[in-house]
Amino acid sequence: MGCDTRYEIHQNAYIKLVLHALKHKSSAVNGVLLGRPSPTGDAVEVTDSVPLFHSQLGVLPPLEISLIMIEEYYGDKGLSIVGYFHGNERFDDAELGTVSKNIADHIYRYFPQAALLLLDNRKLEALPKSKDRSPVMQLYAKDTSRSWKLVGSDGNNQLTIKEPSANVVLLDYISSEKWKDIVDFDDHLDDISKDWLNEGLFK
């Protein structure tokens, strides 16, 4: 089911995840995708995202607390957790680790069309010169054997950004150091006055 699904991510959801990774360049980071399936069921619209952690990504108590809070807040808006985002600690590491698979497996149990997005550091680094409009992320989905498999490496573009100019906006935010303003759940659990929803980020 998963490998036939198309995923469209909204600009702000996309940019939030990349800025989170840029803020913590020397750490692994993760986040969740919020959205809903299309009426036809062949696509998933990712309308928002929440940056989770930049330290101890797989520690259960804070992860469980964050997922409960996220599900409660977005459930009232008619949105569900539809996927997982991961950025590896090392620039040259393009592999899916055990932690990312385990968290994505948890999401998959509740949402079988779940996407797993892995930050592509090389594509992100090349962005200022390449002017590429495609996401700086690799899409993984469950195949029939229930393993996470890379999707779209054959040129089949199943992950798209809703707004074509999203990478232009992203580069502008990078040059203005907007990544300094991003708040994740690590920050919120250290200081609950910090807004994990990042509602003021794009104002």
Image: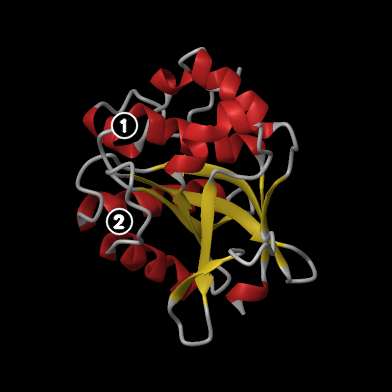
Residue found at the far top of this picture:
176
Quarter holding the C terminus is: top right
Between circles 2 and 1, the one closer to the viewer is: 1
Residue found at the far right of this picture:
40
At horizontal 47% and vertical 87% (from top left) the residue drawn is 145
- As measured in the structure, the alpha-carbon distance from the residue carrying label 2 to the one carrying label 1 is 22 Å
Q: Amino acid at mark 2?
A: Glu
Specify the quadrant of the image occupied by residue 53.
top left
Q: Nearer the viewer, residue 32 or 194?
A: 32
At horizontal 66% and vertical 31% (from top left) the residue drawn is 131
Is the residue marked by circle 2 packed among few (<14), some (14-19), or many (20+) residues within 10 Å? few
Please report whichever mark, 2 or 1, sits nearer to the chain's N-terminal start.
1
Left or right side of 61 for 71: right
Above/below status of 136 relative to 98: above
Quarter holding the N terminus is: bottom right
Above/below status of 99 relative to 52: below
Question: Label 2's element?
Answer: helix
Q: Which residue is mark 2?
A: 64
Left or right side of 77 for 140: left
Q: Which mark is residue 24?
A: 1
Left or right side of 48 for 23: left
Residue found at the far front of this picture:
129
Q: Amino acid at mark 1?
A: His
Q: Which mark is residue 134?
A: none
* Residue 88 pos. (x, y %): 32, 48
Question: Can I make out residue 50 in this image?
Answer: yes
* Residue 130 pos. (x, y %): 62, 33
CB under 8 Å between callouts 2 and 1? no
At horizontal 58% and vertical 50% (from top left) the residue drawn is 76
* Residue 169 pos. (x, y %): 64, 25
Mark count: 2
